[in-house]
Image (spheres, helix red, strand yellow):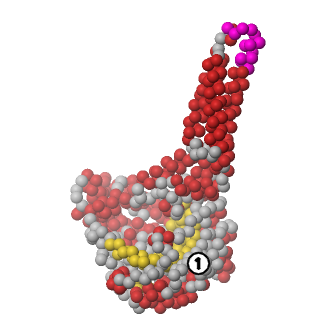
Amino acid sequence: MESIAQTLNDIYQELTELHRVVALQAPVERFLRVRWREIIQTADEIDALSGTHNWESADGEERRERERRSVDERVEALRTAGLDISRPFLQHLNILEFPTELLLRIFNEILPQPISEPEDFRYKPGHPRSLFTNLLDTIRTLRLTCRRFCEVGSELLITDVDIDISLNGLAKLERVASHRTLSKGVRSVKIHMDSLDPRYSTDFLAFTQLVHENAWRRNWLAEGVEENEETINLRADSKAMVEAAADLLAQEPDTAGENENLRYRMLIRRAYEHLHQSFEIQQSLLFTKSFAARVATAVAQMPRARRFELCSEQLKPEIFFPEHLYSPGPDWHIHLDQSLFKHHIDWQSSLLMGWASASYERLPCPTLTLPVDLFTSLNAAGVSLSALVLDFSSPRHMEIPPPTPLEADQMRALVSNLQVLKLKRFLCFGVLPDPEPGKTWATYSTLRSLIEPLVNTRTLRSGELTGEDWNPGRWDGFDADLAALTLGVLIPLRSYSRLRRIVWHEVQIHEREVETLLDGIQTEYPLEIELQGVRLMSGSWRAVLDLLHGRGERHSTRVRNCCGAEERLLSGKKASKTWGYYYHKFPAGRRENDAELFILGETSLNPLSLVDEYQEP
C-alpha cells in the first residue's frame, strides 16, 4: 500500500512540475504528449492494482474504506490534473479557433510545394508524379490530425477544375460544386474552348482521309526509331490503320480483306460515330447557351473560385501535324506515339483528330460567342472575379461578335474587383496563310470591344500580354501594324492608379508604343515592367531602355531573352547607382541570344521580388 501511495505522490509532483513548465510557455508540446501517455498508462495500472489489492489484511473495516477512498481520490486527481495540462497549452495556441483562411495559409507553408497558383497543384502527365504524391500525402496527414484540420485540409484536395465543352465536363464541375467541403477549396475554373470541326464531324470520308494522313505520318516517323517490341507494335498498328483507311476511301466492300483489316475499319467507323455524336451534343450546348448557364451556376456554388481562365488550342494545326518535330530524335517520336496510339483501346478517342483544322476556312464557330455568354451568365449568378486569364488565339479572318451595350455593362460588373488580367496569345496568331479573296482580317476595334469591358482602372494590379513563341524566321511577311495591335491592348493601363506590374512576353513592339504607354502611366505604387522574348520592330533597344530607366528609382525593369537587348547593355558595361546587371549564360547548345539579364531598380535588388503574382485568398 505504501508503494502505491508513493507512486501516486511521485506522479502528482511530476504533474505539478509540468504545470509550472506550461505556465512559463516553454515549447514542450512533444514532451507533454509523451509524458501524458505515460502518466495515463501508470494511472490505469494503479487503478487495476487497487482493484486487486488484498484489503482483507488491513486492520478494521474503517481503515479499509479510508485507504480505498484515498487511492480513488488520488487516481481521480491524477486524471484531472493530466487533462488540465493539455487544455491550457491548446488554449494558449488557440490554433483550433483560427479562421479557415488563416489555417489554409499555415497549411500552405508546410506543403512540399506551396500552392501559389492553382496550376502548381494540378497533376499533369509531363510533371513529376512524386511532387503530386507528396502533396497528397501531406494533406492526408493534416486531415488525420483532428476534426478541424480534416475539414480545413479537405479544401486543399481540389484547388482547380478543368473542363471542356461536353456533358462529361459539366458533370465533373457540377459534382465538385455540389460537394459540401471540396467546393470550398476550388480557387480556379479553367474552360478549354476547343470545338469539334464540322468538316470531320459530319463527313465520314473527310474524317477517314484525315485518319489516313495521320496514320501514314506516324508510320513514316517510326521508320527511324530503334526497333524494340513496343515500337514494332506501334508500327504495325499504324500500317494496318493506313491500309484500312485506304480501303474505306476506295469504298471497298467489307466482304473483301482480312479479319485484321476489317477490325480496323470498324474502329474507324466507331470513332467517327463517337465524334459525330459529340459534335451534335457540343453544338446543342453552345447554341442553346445551356453550357454557359450551367457553368455559372456551378461557379456560384464555389465561394473561393474567383480565378477564371478560358483557353483554346483549336487553331494550332502544328500540334497534330508536327512538321517541325521531325528531327528532335527518337525519344520524342516514341513519346508522341505512346501518348496517342499506344493501345487499340485508344483508337476510338485518339482518332478524334477532327479537333484540329488543317486549313483556315471561314466556318460557323459558336465558341466565338462563348466568352461573352460565360461572362454575362457569371454576372447573373452573382459571381465577382479577381483574376481573369484569356489564353486563346483569335483567328483574324473570323469576326468576334462584339458584346451589346447591356452585355458590356454585365461584364464590367463581373470584373468590378478584378486584380489580375492576363492575355495569352490573344492577339498573336502564329503563322497564318494570306487571306483568301473575299476574306478580311478581324479589325482592331472588334478585338478591342471584347477586352474593354473587362478592364477596371480602379482595382487592377497586374496586366500581362503574352504572344506566341517565335524565332526570327517565323515573322517574315507579317504586317508591321501587328505590333501596334498587340501592344495597343495595354495602352489603357496608363490610367491605372493601382497598377504594380506589366508583362510583355513574346510580342512585337515599337519604340513609339513604349513611349506612349510609359508617358501616361500614373500609379501610386512602384511599377515593375517585365520584357521577355520581346522583338523590337522599330527604334533601338538603347532608347527603349532609356525610357524604362527614366521612370525613376521607384520603378524596376526586368529584361529576359530579348533579341538585341542583352548585347546593347553588356557592350556598354555601365553600372550606375540605380542599375544592377545580372547576366547568366545558359548551358552549351542553346542559341547565342539565350542569355538572361535582370535590370533592377534600387528598391528591387532581389530578382525574386519582381514577381508579384496575385495570390488567391
User: Bounds of the magenta span?
Assistant: 57-69
In what element is the residue under mark 1?
loop
- How far across and down, in percent of the image, does residue 536 sit? 40, 86
Which residue is nearer to you in this view: 587 or 274? 587
Q: Residue at x 46, y 51 (%)?
A: 134
On the rendered image, what quadrant is the C terminus found in? Answer: bottom right
Q: Is residue 477 visible?
A: yes
- Give the image location of residue 82, x and y in percent: 65, 34
Compared across the picture, whether 298 is left or right of 253 comes to right
Q: Is residue 512 left or right of residue 26?
A: left
Instruction: Please determine whether, in this image, residue 413 is positioned above or below residue 105.
Output: below
Q: How many marks?
A: 1
Residue drawn at point x = 68 percent, y = 34 percent = 81
Residue 132: say if magenta.
no
Residue 339 falls in image quadrant: bottom left
Near-viewer residue (296 or 491): 491
| Label 1 packing within 10 angstroms: few (<14), some (14-19), many (20+) | some
Query: Circle 1 is placed at which residue position?
Result: 525
Residue name at image x 64 percent, y 31 percent:
13
Q: Dividing the picture into quarters, in which one does residue 5 lie?
A: top right
